[in-house]
Amino acid sequence: MTLVGKSFPGVRALHDVNLELHAGEVLALLGENGAGKSTLIKILGGAHQPDKGEIAMDGKPVRITSPGIAQRLGIGIIHQEFNLVPALTARENLFLGQERTRFQLIRDRDELVEAERLFQRLGIEVDPNALCRDLTVAHQQAVEIAKALTRTARILVLDEPSAALSSREVSTLFKTIQELKDQGLGVIYISHRLNEVFEIADRVMILRDGKQVGTQDVAKLDRETLIEMMVGRKLQHEFPQRRAAPHGAQQANAGHGSTPAGSGQPRLVVSGLRRGDAVRDVSFHVDRGEILAITGLVGAGRTELARLIFGADLADGGTISLDGRKLSIRTPRDAIAAGICLLTEDRKSEGLVLGLSVQHNYGLPNLAKYSRLGFIRRTGEKRGVQRQIEAMRIKVTGPNQLTRTLSGGNQQKVVLAKWIERNAEVLLFDEPTRGIDVGAKYEIYQLIQRLADQGKAVVMISSELPEVLGMADRILVMHRGRLTGEINDPATASQQDVMKLAIQ
């Protein structure tokens, strides 16, 4: 792609961008949310047409005017949200729209043999006859990749492919990518996880504000330089500086290292919480002003635990207390009334109404505050959301901007703004920075730390171990629904220390 440009009404999305991809290499495409990555990939996939520039394959100019043409040229794009039919089998999804037929009858046996060959080529064992809704996320991803290979893909674009994968599944994904490299495919890898870039990529291309900052061999870059190129400024630290421990915390943590663990005054106390095999007899506490991280492999029960505390699922047993008062939480309404809020793992489908404005999303859990005699006082609501927009530096054109048009980081800030307005005392963050660029991550980290400084009890669920170690005052590790260990001094712990507890 040479000197590619693209504009939308009022926005110049791409400015003279050059992209070069070689056979048998992995090119990491990096940039903050809104940098132009999605627009560039949509042009490559035929969903958008460039205003200017040229696209060539094997030295010959091509015009990609539709996704169908992109597929015929051998370009396969695996989006973060999979394009599968859950009620169909893996085999049926592979050949949907391109069934192997004879006399207008589908040749199931031929498709089955071809499916097994494709999965073998990827080095992944997937049952071709299993329904896609019953497959793990990693296996669904394998089906998507295999589906691209049925169309003789020569270029594969992977958009945030590891976002919902465990560390073991990421290792399997990287082996698959290496297999495809060895077979001569060119791979474009989009991710906000910089450690993955250094592990899998050969070169890295960086976009910022629609412009190409540069393309470099990964071996010539370090993490700090990469972050500076992405955000356009030097970040002194990837995580905020650790806070000094309050006097009470120092006494409470005597003998457990120097990292603070709140004030030593328990706010949230969970005892014997359980629900089937997902959460089994879990007990813990969170102090006033503490950031408690809960981590573990995918499927360990972390999200299920948060949903029980928030009342999204009903517990089989156990108790939850806040500030010494036992709570009866049977619904999210009960949790919200008690001062507990949840920022869900999937903010788009569970945390926001994307078709509504920023103001309306902000106002939904705060209707009682801005209503009188059954009527919403929009003027007061607008003043409130404007206050939060300024305080949290949410990048919007105004309160009426549709939430679906915001970047991931700004969407997360909108979710946080509505709970802050309710003055929630316990904040449960489930994967708070998933799909968020490195600059926006730092702002989210600062907001989390500010809430803790105000005396809130913060529970941060995350599968990103650098984030856990960099942000937490204390770490709990889960495995198969149980707590398997506690790290009281994250400042001196390593990722290996956490993983040992996560795979017990």
Image: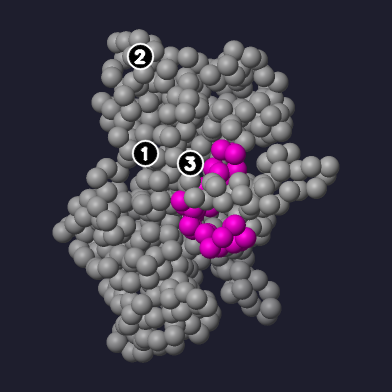
Q: Quadrant of residue 331?
A: top right
What range is drawn magenta here? 393-421
Q: Tell me what residue is drawn at x 61 percent, y 73 percent.
A: 97
Give whichever of 138, 381 is nearer the camera.
381
Q: Which residue is tagged 3?
A: 431
Q: Which residue is tagged 1?
A: 467
As for residue 182 lying within the magenta part, the answer is no
**Up/down of 23 relative to 399, above or below:** below
Q: Quadrant of the C terminus?
A: top left
Q: Quadrant of the N terminus?
A: bottom left
Q: Tell me what residue is drawn at x 49 percent, y 62 percent.
A: 79
Callout 2: helix, strand or loop? helix
Callout 1: helix, strand or loop? helix
The amino acid on which the numbered mark 2 sits, given as a three-letter code, is His
Residue 137: tell me if it is visible: no
Q: How far is the residue under mark 2 from the one under mark 3? A: 30 Å
The amino acid on which the numbered mark 3 sits, given as a three-letter code, is Glu
Q: Tell me what residue is drawn at x 64 percent, y 58 percent.
A: 357
Q: Position of residue 64 (x, y in %)?
A: 46, 84
Give whichever of 277, 352 is nearer the camera.
352
Q: Are marks 2 and 1 in contact (CB under 8 Å)?
A: no
Label at residue 247: 2
Q: Residues within 10 Å of mark 3 (few under 14, many from 20)?
A: many
**Up/down of 467 relative to 2, above or below:** above
